[in-house]
Image: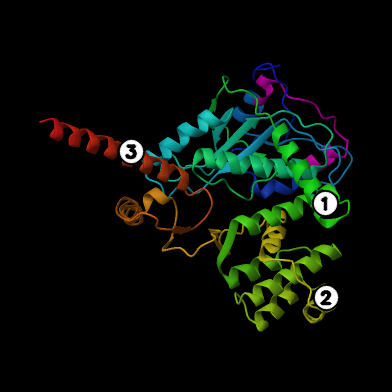
């Protein structure tokens, strides 16, 4: 089956529609999905008509993917499978209408289905989208593998799009179809995910060789994700108040997670993003009621445990579905000191003064190192590709004019 209309989609739908986003009934909806996954209701694939008419047009909550007889907690899901992945695009209000329309065109090229969400504006002032991508089924893999593949696919799609996706969306999260018009790209091939699985298996083998022991998939995904963050990114600043708000929301039940989080506080302290009093407040925020977290933190510090970084904390927060973009300002890592540094708010191309300065630097001063600090998906690749094209056009015109003058 190679086309959308021939494919059966793994989608579990809630059998009721809503006029508005059903926030007040979210408990009822989640209980229904929980019952489905525990095998009380029979799961089945939806055909094309059922997906487009009974889900998109009817505007019903649904989940893409399924699992049977297990909890929906990320570290407890068993038998997960999916052939449809969803990505949210939110907060395009910083872009001018022309740019939003350009993003919309790219979405329709990259995804099989694109539908505006409940909260999308009627004009282009603040568009929001649900983007559905038909993917190859991976087979019998742990949920951690699916989660890793989803993250890597999101990164690649974000690079292609030039805009970041909503980090709060994940594979186990219910989606609320809006009933609004949707776009369908029947010509787009099914996205093959095998390359991401092969990539993970190679990284897992390398990790086991380094650690000189076998590790389970969940541990491998965590260690690989943290290592890649530490290699490629640098924390530029930390908003402590927002960090404390986020840590309060953490439910830390596993001993190993508790230790990792305490050690990440130590790294924050060593790098002087927080002081000792703030460390104590953070420890109290994840205490089990016995007031042992700060004592354990001090014990770990005395023993000189290290190797756990801020990247670990960012990973733990992300796994708990907490958006970290407002907590940590992140820059891409660099080996040499930058000559110029710019903090980007919103989309790069909308920061006209900064764009003009960067263009001037590149045109007039060779060998300058430029550091851009901001969220991922701010359009760096698109900006520099366009700039390179403009410089190349200018060079061609300059050489042509020089040749004509010499021939005259």
Helix, strand or loop at mark 2: loop
Helix, strand or loop at mark 1: helix
- Which residue is drawn at the image coordinates 71% and 62% (left, top)? 312
At label 2, counting other C-alpha atoms closer than 10 Å, the crowd grade (few under 14, some 14-19, many 20 or more) is: few
Tell whether 124 sits left or right of 301: left
Specify how the rendered protein is coloured.
rainbow
Magenta part of the chain: 32-51
Residue 172 in sight: no
With respect to residue 245, does 388 lie above or below?
A: above
Q: Quadrant of residue 179?
A: top right
Which disc is residue 289 wearing?
2
Tell whether 223 sits left or right of 399: right
Q: Is residue 34 magenta?
A: yes
With respect to residue 20, does 260 lie above or below?
A: below
Mark 1 or mark 3: whose residue is earlier in sequence? 1
Tell whether 105 sits left or right of 17: left
Depth check, mark 3 against mark 2: the one in front is 3
Query: What residue would you read off at disc 3?
Result: 392
Query: What residue would you read off at disc 1?
Result: 209
Q: Is residue 380 magenta?
A: no
Mark 1 or mark 2: whose residue is earlier in sequence? 1
- Which residue is drawn at the image coordinates 68% and 45% (left, top)? 170
At label 3, counting other C-alpha atoms closer than 10 Å, the crowd grade (few under 14, some 14-19, many 20 or more) is: few
């Amino acid at each position: 089956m190679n086309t959308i209309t021939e494919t059966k989609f793994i989608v579990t739908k809630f059998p009721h529609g809503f006029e508005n986003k059903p926030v007040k009934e979210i408990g009822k909806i989640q209980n229904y999905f929980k019952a489905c996954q525990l095998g009380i209701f029979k799961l089945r694939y939806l055909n094309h008509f059922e997906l487009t008419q009974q889900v998109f047009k009817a505007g019903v909550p649904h989940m893409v993917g399924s699992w049977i007889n297990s909890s929906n907690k990320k570290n407890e899901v068993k038998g997960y499978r999916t052939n449809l992945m969803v990505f949210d695009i939110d907060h395009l209000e910083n872009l001018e209408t022309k740019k939003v329309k350009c993003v919309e065109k790219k979405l329709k090229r990259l995804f099989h289905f694109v539908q505006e969400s409940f909260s999308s504006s009627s004009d282009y002032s603040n568009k929001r989208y649900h983007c559905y991508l038909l993917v190859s089924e991976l087979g019998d893999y742990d949920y951690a593998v699916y989660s890793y593949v989803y993250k890597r696919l999101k990164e690649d799609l974000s690079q292609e799009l030039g805009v970041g996706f909503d980090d709060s969306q994940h594979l186990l999260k219910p989606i609320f179809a809006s009933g609004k018009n949707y776009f369908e790209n029947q010509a787009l091939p099914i996205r093959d995910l095998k390359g991401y699985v092969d990539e993970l298996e190679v990284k897992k083998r390398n990790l086991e060789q380094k650690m000189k022991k076998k590790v389970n998939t969940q541990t491998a995904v965590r260690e690989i994700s943290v290592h890649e963050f530490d290699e490629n990114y640098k924390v530029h600043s930390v908003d402590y108040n927002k960090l404390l708000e986020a840590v309060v929301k953490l439910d830390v039940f596993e001993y190993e997670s508790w230790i990792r989080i305490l050690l990440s506080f130590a790294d924050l302290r060593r790098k002087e993003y927080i002081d000792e009093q703030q460390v104590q407040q953070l420890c109290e925020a994840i205490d089990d009621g016995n007031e042992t977290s700060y004592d354990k933190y001090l014990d770990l510090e005395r023993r000189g445990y290290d190797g756990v970084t801020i990247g670990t904390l960012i990973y733990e927060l992300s796994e708990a579905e907490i958006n970290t973009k407002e907590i940590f300002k992140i820059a891409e890592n660099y080996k040499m000191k930058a000559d110029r540094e710019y903090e980007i708010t919103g989309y790069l191309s909308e920061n006209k003064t900064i764009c003009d300065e960067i263009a001037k630097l590149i045109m007039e001063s060779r060998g300058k190192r430029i550091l851009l600090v901001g969220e991922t998906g701010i359009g760096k690749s698109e900006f520099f590709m366009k700039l390179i094209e403009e410089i190349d056009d200018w060079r061609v015109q300059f050489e042509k004019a020089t040749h004509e003058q010499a021939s005259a």
